[in-house]
Amino acid sequence: MNALPRSFQHVRLVLAREKSSPEGDSRNGYDLVVPLDEENRLDPAEWKEHRAFCRVRRFQPGQADLIGLLRRKPGGHWFIDYDAEESDDDEAGYRLGDERFVPGEYVSIHDGEAMHTYVVVSVTRP
């Protein structure tokens, strides 16, 4: 992965506090390898050029990890695609293009059943 542009970062998200998990849950979250711009937002131009490297790993207790790609629809809507052959496995990010990926910030992702909020816990070079 050393051939990735410097804009690529490994972003770790973990479940923030919510009704079903009042303390949050560091065992439930996402690892993203994505390009970020100077403001730590997703970089659509770098994504377009290197989209095959924009990987996502979803981890949850008691379940096998899901591996997918970060994708972008026309109009700028970002989503996670776990299987290119199916559209019902996609998870939608809520305004991911506007979010800043810095530790302490919050990101919302709809997992197909409900919207959950995650906190950015780290941003490092892959």
Image (cartoon, grey):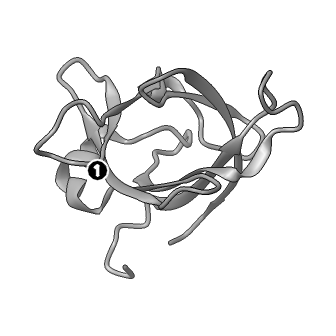
Q: Identify the residue position indicated by label 1 in the image.
A: 46
Query: Is residue 86 placed above or below 12 in the rendered structure?
Result: above
- Evaluate whether residue 55 shows in this view: no
Residue depicted at 10% across the width and 44% down the height: 85
Hey, which quadrant is residue 87 in on the image? top left
Q: Which residue is most to the right?
A: 23
Provide residue 76's location: percent of width, then percent of height. 28, 23
Residue depicted at 30% across the width and 38% down the height: 44
Tell me if 85 is positioned left or right of 33 in this view.
left
Hey, which quadrant is residue 61 in on the image? bottom right
Question: For this rendering, which residue is in front, 17 or 6?
Answer: 17
Tell me if 52 is positioned left or right of 93 in this view.
left
Provide residue 19's location: percent of width, then percent of height. 80, 21
Per the image, label 1 sits on a secondary structure element best described as helix
Q: Which residue is most to the bottom?
A: 2
Query: Is residue 48 placed above or below 2 in the rendered structure?
Result: above
Quarter placement of the N terminus: bottom left
Tell me if 86 is positioned left or right of 115 in this view.
left
Residue depicted at 31% across the width and 34% down the height: 90
Residue depicted at 60% across the width and 42% down the height: 101
Question: For this rendering, which residue is in front, 98 or 107?
Answer: 107
Provide residue 53's location: percent of width, then percent of height. 29, 62
